[in-house]
Structures are given as structure tokens and as C-alpha cells.
Amino acid sequence: MALQSVFEPFVARLRARDVADTSDIRQLAEWLDTQFEIPGTKIRFGFDSIIGLIPGVGDLATTVLGAYIVIRARELGAPATLQARMVLNLAIDALVGAVPLFGDIFDLAFKSHVRNVRMLLRHLEDAGR
């Protein structure tokens, strides 16, 4: 059974063009933060949690991937304040994620990539009204 997208409630309220324009970053955020579910729980995690287990380079790699989401937000017209909040989320994820064990547990809860895409989708929804 496929997992329901964490973005479905947002996508339903967006213009068709915004849905198409954000499909790549929505998919990336889901892969990084919510691709898998621990059986018998509602705990979801993604490749960010897995790759982050690699000391040193793991968190750097997922931060670079997360930066793509911020770049796409800029291309889609996100205001500078929104971009700054997205960068802050990414920085928090990178810095706390670098702490052994605690950072890996933090990644399960914080989900910066999904958080950033949700903020962008809210902005696009408001702009489309």
C-alpha cells in the first residue's frame, strides 16, 4: 500500500500550474523526510535520516539536496523573507543533525525539507487567491 502524500491537502488548493511547478520538490522532500513508515506506528522517515547516519558527509549531502528546494522556491517567486526562513530550517537541520545520535533522532521529528515545501505551498496558495 502506498503512503499518502503529506502534501495532498495543499495540492488540492493550488492552481494546476503551481502543482506542476512544485512536483519535483514535493517528491524530493518526501524522499528525504517521509518516504518510509515504521510498521505499526505513524512514524515516517526518509533518506535524510538514513544518509545522515554517515558521519560528516551525510548531513552535508542532505543539506545540499535541501538547498535545491530553496533555489526552486526562489525561481517560483518566493519572497526573500520566506527564503530566509527556509534557509534557517535547513541550517537547523544541518547543525543539529551533525550531533551523533541526537541529530538522527532530531531528523525524525523536524523534517526540514517537508516543512520548507509546505511553507512554499502556503505562499503559492495565498498568491493564487
Image (tube, rainbow, N blue to C red):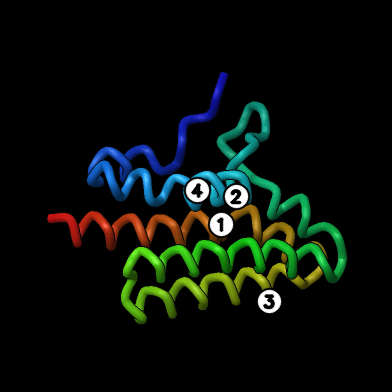
Please, what is the three-letter code of the amino acid marked with disc 4? Answer: Asp
Toward the viewer: 45 or 16? 16
Q: Earlier in the sequence, mark 3 or mark 4?
A: 4
Toward the viewer: 66 or 3? 66
Q: Earlier in the sequence, mark 1 or mark 3?
A: 3
Alpha-carbon span between mark 2 and mark 3: 17 Å
Q: Which mark is drawn over residue 95?
A: 3
Alpha-carbon span between mark 3 and mark 4: 25 Å
Q: Give the SS element for disc 4.
A: helix
How many neighbours does mark 4 have within 10 angstroms: few (below 14), some (14-19), or many (20 or more)?
few
**Does 86 sit left or right of 44 as displayed?**
left
Closer to the eye: label 2 or 4: 4
Mark 2 vs 1: CB contact within 8 A: yes
Could you tell me which residue is drawn at 87 percent across and 66 percent down?
55
How many neighbours does mark 2 have within 10 angstroms: few (below 14), some (14-19), or many (20 or more)?
many
**Does 55 sit left or right of 28 as displayed?**
right
Could you tell me which residue is drawn at 47 percent across and 31 percent down?
4
To which residue does mark 1 refer? 111
Whether 6 is drawn above or below 32: the answer is above
Please, what is the three-letter code of the amino acid marked with disc 1? Answer: Lys
